[in-house]
Structures are given as C-alpha cells and as structure tokens.
Image (cartoon, rainbow, N blue to C red):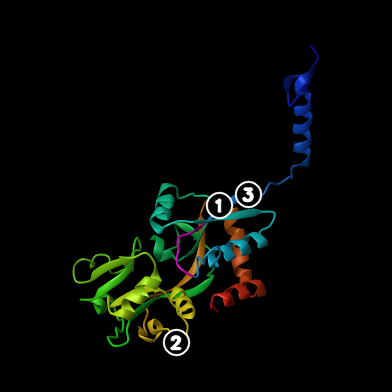
Amino acid sequence: MKTRICFGHMQYASKGALCVAALMLTALAPAGAVESLPAYNSYQAVPFVVENGGLAADLVGYLNEKLKGKYNFTLTNLPREKLNQTLDKDANFKGVVMFLTPNFVADPDKKKYHWSPGLFNDANAVISLNTKKIEYVDPDSLKGTKFAGVGGNKYQGFEERFGKDIQRENANEELSNLRKVASGKADVTIMPMITYRYLLKQLGEQSPVRTTLYLSTKPHARFERAIFSANADTALSKEIDAVVSGAQTDPAWKKIMAKYGLE
C-alpha cells in the first residue's frame, strides 16, 4: 500500500488529504500567536457592571484595542472571595486583575504583585440619613449603628466589630442599601464613591432616596485604582504599564471616564 510522510509520521494514502490540510493550516498560522488571558473584575456593582456592559467591559475593550496582536483579554467577573482563592492558589496567575489597590489584597508594599500606574482615584463613601448625619472620623464613628452591607464584601476596620457594637445586615447590591438608609431601616452604609455617584445619577434629581441621604465629608478611605499582574510575567506587566501611562492623555480613555462621571 502506498504511503505518505507527514510531520515525520507514516500516513496511509487514504489520510493524505488530512496531511495536506494540516500543512496548509501551519503555513497560514501567524508567526506569533496572540495570547488569550483573563481580566478579572470582582466588582459586580454599577458602574463596573451595567447590564451587558459597564466600566469593566469598556476597560477590557480598551486594553484589547491597545494591545492588538499581542494579548487578548476576556472579561471574567467573579466575587471577591473567589478572586482571593484564585490568587492564593497561584501567585503566578495568568492575566490581570482590574480596579483594586494594594491594601485591598494585602500588598501595601507592592511586592507581592506588579502594579500598574493608577487608572483613576476613588474613595469609600460613608452615607447616612440627613436627619441623623454621621460625619466619619474613624471606625468608632459607626459605634452603635445598624450597618447596611453587601453580602460577601469585607469592610476594613469594621469586620471585628460587626455583631458586637455595630449591627450588620446584608443586601445583594448597593442600591438596596441606599434605600435602606433613606427609609431609616439602616443607619449607614459604605460603598465606592464611583458607585454612589452613578446610583444618584440613575435615581435622578427628584428621587426621594437621593434627597434624604447625607455624604460624610471625610470618606472611609481614599485610594487609587489600578491593574495588577503576577511579578513573574514581566512582558505582560511592561505592556500594561505602557497602556495605562498613555491612557491619561488618550481621548479614547477620557471618553470612557466621562461616560461614568470620572475625571
């Protein structure tokens, strides 16, 4: 029986067509394949996730456009606890994590992961009822209050006090907590300022929820949101740093920022 040779293996004549197809595919394949990687987002609230889009999706789209031909990111939304498990399992994880800050992942010295330049500034807003205003100074400011939290979220400085001198009740998302405070069912809640402002915009100027809330002059914390990746992936880190550095003067990124009320 007649034989053909393909990639060093003996193939029967009946399989010759497969050999030719394989060789053609190899010839057509690009010299440097684009690496596909996850882009993790642990924020499920607006504006990070808005219906089928949101800031997380827009950031992934921006990164893919700027890194076209080098990397392709796939948005991976997951709860913070699941993200923590992923990072704890492998410090040399593949891909990037978006929107966090070093203190949020126990990396204050920026040694555990590689951090990009900042994407934008944010803060944790402290929101109470305007007839029972809470001006935040430190965790003691919330002593004796009923706190409206989001299930699964951790609140720095308060975790050890929940169930003791601060009563915590959880909801599934931040808008429910604003309504709890506005109705007097809770005394206070904390959420990202970017989320608070976006929700106020959604509620509208005349919303009774909006008109009954008070925003503490001092936030729970101020921070800069960034992107981080594994220290071992220096090639990826270099590319991300370059994109984020250039974004600050890029009209395309400024348009995304304006879309969500960011400077």
- Can you tell which quarter of the image residue 214 is in? bottom left
Question: SS class of the residue under badge 2?
Answer: loop
Give the labeled residue for mark 3. Answer: 35
Q: Of callouts 2 and 3, which one flags the residue occurring earlier in the amino acid sequence?
A: 3
The spot of residue 144 in percent (x, y) is 20, 76
Q: Which residue is mark 2?
A: 206
**Residue 230 seen in the figure:** yes
Q: How much space separates mark 2 and mark 1, taking CA atoms?
A: 50 Å
Q: Are marks 2 and 3 in contact (CB under 8 Å)?
A: no
Quarter holding the C terminus is bottom right
Identify the main secondary structure in magenta: loop
Give residue 206's quadrant in the image: bottom left
Q: CA distance from mark 2 to mark 3?
A: 49 Å
Tag 3 and tag 1, C-beta contact below 8 Å: no
Q: Residues within 10 Å of mark 1 (few under 14, many from 20)?
A: some
Q: Is residue 13 left or right of residue 131?
A: right
The residue that label 1 is drawn on is: 233
Question: Which residue is pictured at 45% across the width and 60% down the height?
Answer: 42
Q: Of the residues shown, which amino acid type is indicated by label 2?
A: Gln
Front position in the image: 47 or 249 = 47
Furthest toward the right, the residue is 2
The local crowd at label 2, few if under 14, some if 14 to 19, many if 20 or more residues have their Cα within 10 Å, is few
Q: Residue at x 43, y 50 (%)?
A: 86
Above-or-below relation of 123 to 13:
below
Mark identifier at residue 165: none
Does residue 44 show up magenta in the picture? yes
Residue 243 located within the stretch drawn in magenta: no
Label 3 Cα crowd, 10 Å radius (few <14 / some 14-19 / many 20+): few
**Residue 155 appears in view:** no
Up-down relation of residue 32 to residue 23 (above or below): below
Label 3 element class = strand
Q: Quadrant of the N terminus?
A: top right
